[in-house]
Amino acid sequence: MAGLPGDPVVFGLEDCAVYQMTDATSEPETYASKVDVPGIRRLGVTVNFDPTEELRGDNTVLAVAGGKINSVSLDVENAILDIEAMAVIFPSAVSSGGSTPNEEKKITFATDEDAGYFKIVGHADLPDSGNVLVTIYKCRAGGATISFGDNTFAIPGFTIRGVENNAHDIIDFHLYETETAIS
């Protein structure tokens, strides 16, 4: 195949990473090192628009204003409960101790912790060649879920809201002809 397809088909979600924002005032913002989100299953993205305003008269719509993108909402699901990734998404106290066979890790969510900003990047394949990287530059956690049940795997998930960064960017969908990993 020569070049990217005009209307690419995207298949699967191969990888996901988060980066804690270390300086929200610089342009571009700065981030800590990549933290993998292992076992990623789903990265659902909804682009949100400002409410539109209609000017009505003569029993009809005369003009419409608004409709600019104001944020994105993400619904994320992964198969692995990873404390390091959770600590970026939900700033919280992480502790570990012991050694095999008595090693332990703990993450504690407290009411006095402020959910900081972070960047999230998802990697999906183009079946013929290449891939897509979806990047949301300035995110904040909205909530977390995990369900434990009888004879079933627990599936952790979380919701995120992405807003514009200092360059007024919210989300990128970057298509690559040659496979490009999250860096």
Image (cartoon, rainbow, N blue to C red):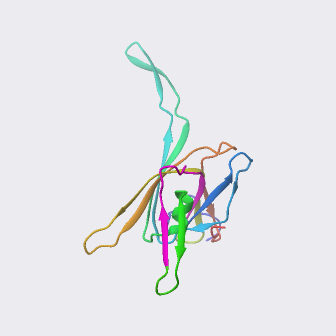
- What residue sits 55% from the left and 57% below the top? 91
Query: Is residue 135 rendered to the left or right of residue 167?
Result: left
| Residue 32 can be seen in this image | yes
Query: Is residue 34 rendered to the left or right of residue 76?
Result: right
- The stretch of residues the image draws in magenta is 104-125
Count of all numbered marks drawn on residues in the image: 0
Q: Please identify the quadrant where the C terminus is shown.
A: bottom right
Front residue of 103/31: it is 103
In the image, residue 90 above or below residue 41: above
Q: Which image quadrant is residue 130 in?
A: bottom right
- What residue sits 59% from the left and 51% below the top? 117
The furthest residue to the top? 58
Q: Which image quadrant is residue 173 in?
A: bottom right
Q: Please identify the quadrant where the N terminus is shown.
A: bottom right
Membership of 155 in magenta stretch: no
Q: Position of residue 140 (x, y in %)?
A: 54, 50
